[in-house]
Image (cartoon, grey):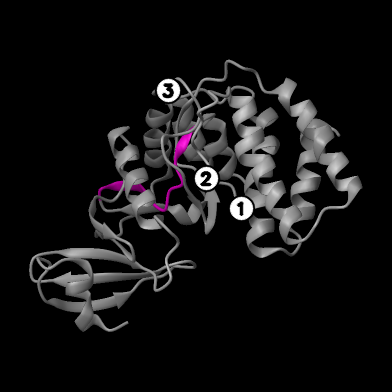
Amino acid sequence: MNQNLLPEQISANLGPILKTTRLHGGDINSVYHLKTADNDLVLKTNDSPLPGMFEAEAKGLDLLRDGGLPVPKVIDFGTEFLLLEYLPAGKHDPENAGHRLGKLHAKRVSTPGLDHDNYIGILPQSNKNPENLNWANFYIEHRIRAQLRLLQKSRGLAATEIKFWDGWISKLETYLTKDVPLALLHGDLWSGNLYYAQSGAFFIDCAVYNGDPYVDLAMTTLFGRFPSSFYEAYKEIHSMQDFHIFEQIYHVYPLLVHANLFGGSYYHSARECAARSLHV
């Protein structure tokens, strides 16, 4: 990265950049800590960005902030970059994180989806719901079937696999109740997207939409469970009753996403998870 180009690339008003430090993470984008005379900032950039990627993330962060969830403040964004406030690292406080997520999930919304689409990793995530689908049908069509269509296109699915998924989806449609309480979701809440700043827990790298709060909770248990204090604090704000019943169901979508992104054994993990969840 040529840091001499950064002021023009980001904003004419940013001023000279005194120091640029590469930050950890950034599987999809490159992430830097920028120090200027007046500010410390975080820059996410990509030489070949997906259409609307940074705009969608900026919108998502603003929605989460409006919902009361602590997220980094968006300073600016463009086709190839997202500029955020820099938050100095602090001590881990899972209890604080649990409280903060519980407060977001306690605020009800009426319909699933969102008024704009975004991304989960580098995969398009469809959120628009003009059909006014209920939660069960939204999750099936815009999450599960969307990923299965990508898998069918990229690797093909045998007739036996299609039959399995059709059977699982048929059960799922009747299993998910139509009156699931909905809330704004972070959408990709694994441990790497929870950041502990000096002022408490902050949530980053979102893929937001309105849905069942258990979707976020299930993501926290998929790739290494969060500390128990996180869930105890969450339960002080928002119920986790019967979460164990839905946990496996909501593991299926991110596993299918990983199957599309990385291949390997993720498809088999998704299939096994689906089979366990509803005993197909």
Q: Picture quarter containing residue 4?
A: bottom left
48 up-or-down from 243: above or below: below
Q: Tell us which disc is closer to us: 3 or 1.
A: 3
- Seen at 56% across and 32% down, the residue is 214
How packed is label 1: few (under 14 Cα within 10 Å), some, or many (20 or more)?
few
Instruction: Specify whether residue 206 is painted magenta.
Output: yes
- Residue name at image x 53 percent, y 42 percent: 126
Q: Residue at x 72, y 61 (%)?
A: 154
The residue that label 1 is drawn on is 223
Q: How packed is label 2: few (under 14 Cα within 10 Å), some, or many (20 or more)?
A: some
- Residue 196 is left or right of residue 191, and the answer is left
Residue that mark 3 sits on: 109
Up-down relation of residue 10 to residue 112 (above or below): below
Q: Please, what secondary structure does the residue beneath circle 1 have?
A: loop
Magenta segment boundaries in residue numbering: 199-210
Residue drawn at 66 percent across, 30 percent down = 246
Is residue 263 one of those drawn in magenta? no
